[in-house]
Amino acid sequence: FRMAPLVNIWKLVGQINSMKIEIIKGELKGHIEFEGKLESALDSGVTILNHSMTLVQRLENLFMSGNNSDVTLRVQTINTDEVKVLQAHSLVLSLQSDVFEELLLSRNSSTLVLREAPDCAAVFDKFLRYFYCGDIGVRLEQAIPLHKLASKYHVGTLQQGMTQYMTQHLSSDSPSGHVVSWYNYALQIGDSALRDSCLQYLSWNLSSVLQSAEWGSISDDLLLSLLQRSDLILQSELELFEALEAWINQNQPLGAVVESALRAIRYGMIPPQHLFRLQKQSPLLVKYYEAIRDLLYLAFQFHSASPIQLAKYFDVNCSIFTPRNYLSSSWGSSWIINNPTRDDRSFSFQTQLGPSGHDSNKRVTWNALFSPRWLPLSARSTYTELGAMQPTRTDGGRPRIIVTPATSSPDFAGVGFQKTVIVMARQQGKVVVRHVYNFHQSTEEAGDFLVDADLQRRVSEYLIDSSLYLHVVIKPVYHSLLLSRK
Ligand SMILES: *[C@@H]1O[C@H](CO)[C@@H](O)[C@H](O)[C@H]1NC(C)=O
Ligand SMILES: *[C@@H]1O[C@H](CO)[C@@H](O)[C@H](O)[C@H]1NC(C)=O
Ligand SMILES: *[C@@H]1O[C@H](CO)[C@@H](O)[C@H](O)[C@H]1NC(C)=O
Ligand SMILES: *[C@@H]1O[C@H](CO)[C@@H](O)[C@H](O)[C@H]1NC(C)=O
Ligand SMILES: *[C@@H]1O[C@H](CO)[C@@H](O)[C@H](O)[C@H]1NC(C)=O
């Protein structure tokens, strides 16, 4: 439709800092025709005519046609004679990249020669299109070359976008895996946030990683840094040992690397019947027996008596007696809570008293309580002061989990049971580990338990088919024994 020839436009400029509003009155003469979508603004009297999509479309056409180009880019692939010739516009290049601005100022001719590695040259058109359109379609294998180009030419928004893309696509399916190469890249460019995200992803999804083709490709350094971690989430220590064996067979690293890796296995966490078998039948352990003889010996001692007896004579505060996050049923249970905001839920499960062979037949029953809206003590006291009934659950409350043993037993003496709750969430359609909370009795100790989960929202990424997916792990630790010895 056609607007009146004379239109008054009121522009509102809200000055948020000073909370003052300045009103500018202007006049626009002429005809305005509406083609695109019309959106009325929140401010009264102002209507925004939004044709930004048309503008982007025109810019894309400009990129595709190369019309009125004032600079030719010759993209040479390093160490080959491949050349890609692209028509560009110096205004657009300078707008997005100060590196291009410099190059354009110092050029002698209408051609700029750029030398790029093969992976970067392959995505250069895509990269250049981003300068015109501000959007880009990315595949997993294009993330590194696009990040490299964005860094080289100082295209900050794209560089940040690529880092974010990588952080969010760690769990995506790829035939040969991509997280290890992203980790190596992050290490190389010194991006510690991306490096840590990759490392955490690998640690929290280790069982999948161990079975993937990617596992064989990890570097010595990455292997050793993973093996040091106590927060690895995997089935069992035996699974880790077997994967290490496969990695060593495939990579044939230096003897020193093999020894360090073998010494990082927590032998105390492997039941003695498996240790006997490995000691005699694993070609790797047979070959490196001398390098880990002391650890195996310590592990067998640990299995032969109760940890409290062992602690009278030996230091039990060392990593071979420290559990990781084992998913096997001896150490915990998954817990799926349907409609978690509805009411309190409780759940019981059993674990083995401890990893020592001495304790392998002893079971502990645990009661877990989930409360969706539990009010922290601090908030509760103000209610009591106001004379109200002391509420245990209110709308202002926060979710929490309490895990306590169903019965007490003299066997618990000196054992500290650390509880770990693993929380899954949906990311890019995949179920991934989103948080790991450690505590002794209540998640209250962690302070931030499910603080951003927003379970009230049906679309919360923490709800998978309206359920909260948890896994509770019980980890017997003997540090307190060490203190009582001293
Ligand atoms: C104009 O439209 C585009 C796409 O439809 C939208 O992303 C943008 O926010 C709109 N701009 C304004 C000022 O409304
Ligand atoms: C490019 O220029 C040619 C010739 O001037 C013209 O026919 C064509 O429509 C232009 N293309 C675009 C996308 O503007
Ligand atoms: C421009 O020309 C000068 C002299 O011919 C040459 O030394 C310089 O390297 C050229 N610069 C570029 C960017 O090609
Ligand atoms: C583990 O990685 C696989 C892909 O390799 C993915 O499908 C799965 O969702 C991940 N699981 C977790 C718990 O992160
Ligand atoms: C146990 O060892 C760890 C790391 O070596 C140390 O941080 C911790 O304080 C030790 N605990 C006790 C009780 O000695």
Image (cartoon, rainbow, N blue to C red):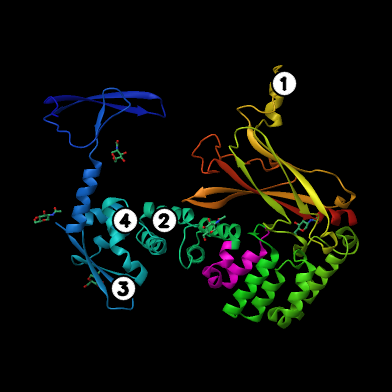
Q: Is residue 358 left or right of residue 465?
A: right
| Highlighted range, magenta | 208-230
229 drawn magenta: yes
Q: Nearer the viewer, mark 1 or mark 3?
A: 1
Residue 384, numbered label: 1
For residue 77, the mark is: 3
Q: Is residue 325 above or below residue 223?
A: above
Give yes or no for contact between labels 1 and 4 (Cβ–Cβ under 8 Å): no
Q: CA distance from mark 1 to mark 3?
A: 73 Å
Amino acid under disc 2? Met
Distance in Å between CA atoms under marks 3 and 4: 21 Å
Asked if the residue at tag 4 contacts the one at tag 2, i.e. Cβ–Cβ closer than 8 Å, the answer is no
Q: Look at the image and tell me in which quarter the C terminus lies.
A: bottom right
- Dot 2 or dot 4, earlier in sequence: 4
Q: Which of 293/18 is in front?
A: 293
Numbered-mark total: 4
Which residue lies at the image location 42% right of the left edge and 29% below the top edge?
17
Residue 486 visible in the snapshot:
no
Q: Is residue 194 magenta?
A: no
Residue 186 picture location, percent across and down: 49, 62
Which numbered disc, 3 or 2, marks the residue that appears first in the sequence? 3
Q: Which residue is mark 2?
A: 162
Residue occupied by mark 4: 97
